[in-house]
Amino acid sequence: MTRRGTLYGLGLGPGEPDLMTVRAHRLLASATHVAFFRKAGRPGQARRIVDGLLPAGAVEYAMEYPVTTEIALDDPAYNEALSAFYAESARQLRSLSDAGHDVVILCEGDPFFYGSFMHLYTRLVDTHPVQVVPAITGMSGAWTATGQPITWGDDVLTVLMGTLPEARLARHMADSDALVVMKIGRHIEKVRRALTAAGRLEEAWLVEFATMPGQKVVRLADAQGRIAPYFSIVLVHGQGRRP
Amino acid sequence: MTRRGTLYGLGLGPGEPDLMTVRAHRLLASATHVAFFRKAGRPGQARRIVDGLLPAGAVEYAMEYPVTTEIALDDPAYNEALSAFYAESARQLRSLSDAGHDVVILCEGDPFFYGSFMHLYTRLVDTHPVQVVPAITGMSGAWTATGQPITWGDDVLTVLMGTLPEARLARHMADSDALVVMKIGRHIEKVRRALTAAGRLEEAWLVEFATMPGQKVVRLADAQGRIAPYFSIVLVHGQGRRP
């Protein structure tokens, strides 16, 4: 019987290639099978990060998200479409493992911190060998880009998604020292209103494309009317004890 | 006039040497001057991580924390002792930079996420060239060690220090989906009481020495009476939307 191949959930970090780990770099340099998520018709951010790092002859598997833009997030059909997609992607990965192939699955940021990989992970880990390689989170790339520490001393840090209801955002924003808000995109005006309600707007920064080409760091209050791209993070720095 | 040397705040990640970044590895391999914090009489965790990675002849500067165990945290003398220590360490780094030396300052985890480096950073960045190299946080090493994703979908994640008052801990624990509690040590019983008050004790994991020799992952409820070492993190995983 063929030894099953290992499926690596490989964190790539925030975007700049030399911010991936030594372990990730080594696994990429010897990869024979590489899988990654992307939107249909797009090159995909994870794949872009490893440009020039894969060996010639590595076989690539693009896992293309189903088009769900016309389905509301809370419509059961949305979850069903995604669920079928993850099930099919997992099936393909299992068959590669069963054939004895190690597969490197590219993950933006850290594989266990939000993201899509974990939906494969839960479908694979009970039956096939899976290894997760942690990585620098996108938010760490963002706070480094601001040139200011995010948390000091006993600061409380809360990580929020821009997709949450405005009242819940505002409540956490008022009750935390440092803040990270991800999944901004078209939610930016809601995030701005919630920060204003919490009295934190003046302290907030908007970071776009942290550690990537096109990186931009601006005060959120100075970015009125700005449409934030997907790779945007809003930050409020903590002000804890500093001897 | 000599060109001033660059002071690198070099994040080393959670502990395992191949979980540092390619950039950190390259800077270490060519380092001529290396500074790091440690307790007096101890080798220091940051220095241990780079064992065998520094070039022969690299000059090392151990910055030894003042002994403050007999001073209460809220006594002004505590802050004064630390402040004088950071001022003196920064003075030494400035003089190395002025002499044209690049200095690699070793940081456990990510330099801008809690930690000591930022107290040097604020004393150096206005006058001398400083570059920060982000890294995997200790908490990311810890959730990877549990083999479970920490956050899904729209989960709210709150990062807390075990040094906070019990009531504030319990309030955040009840109001967040996923939790990370750091600086556990002798605060473990308070953290356990706060989790119990918030109804979250049964979901909590204790991770000791994540990604390091001696790594241990146990349910916190099964670790009654355990004295947690300094490198301990308590985690509660989020349970967000999973298609």
Image (cartoon, coloured by chain):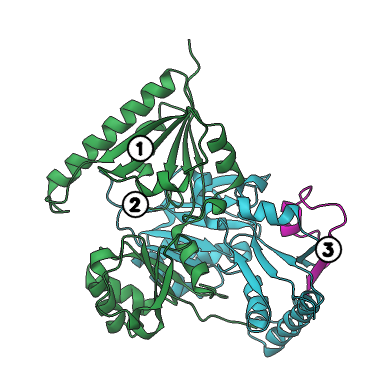
Chain colours: A cyan, B green
Q: CA distance from mark 3 to mark 1?
A: 45 Å
Residue sitting farthest toward the right: A57
Q: Secondary structure at mark 2?
A: loop
How crowded pointer 2 is (Cα within 10 Å; few <14, some 14-19, many 20+) is rated as: many
Q: Nearer the viewer, residue B213 or B69?
A: B213
Closer to the eye: label 2 or 1:
1
Above or below B178: residue A207: above
Which label belongs to residue A221? none
Above or below A209: residue A181: below
Going from the N terminus, do you reach mark 2 or mark 3 first?
A: 3
Residue highlighted by disc 1:
B120
Quadrant of the image occupied by residue B176: bottom left
Q: Secondary structure at mark 1?
A: helix
Coordinates of residue B5 in the picture (x, y in percent): 48, 24
Q: Nearer the viewer, residue B128 or B147?
A: B147
Coordinates of residue A4 in the picture (x, y in percent): 74, 76
- Range of the magenta residues? A40-66
Residue highlighted by disc 2:
A152
Mark 1 belongs to which amino acid?
Leu
Residue A179 visible from this viewpoint? yes
Q: Mark 1 belongs to which subunit? A: B
Residue highlighted by disc 3:
A60
Q: Nearer the viewer, residue B171 or A228?
A: B171
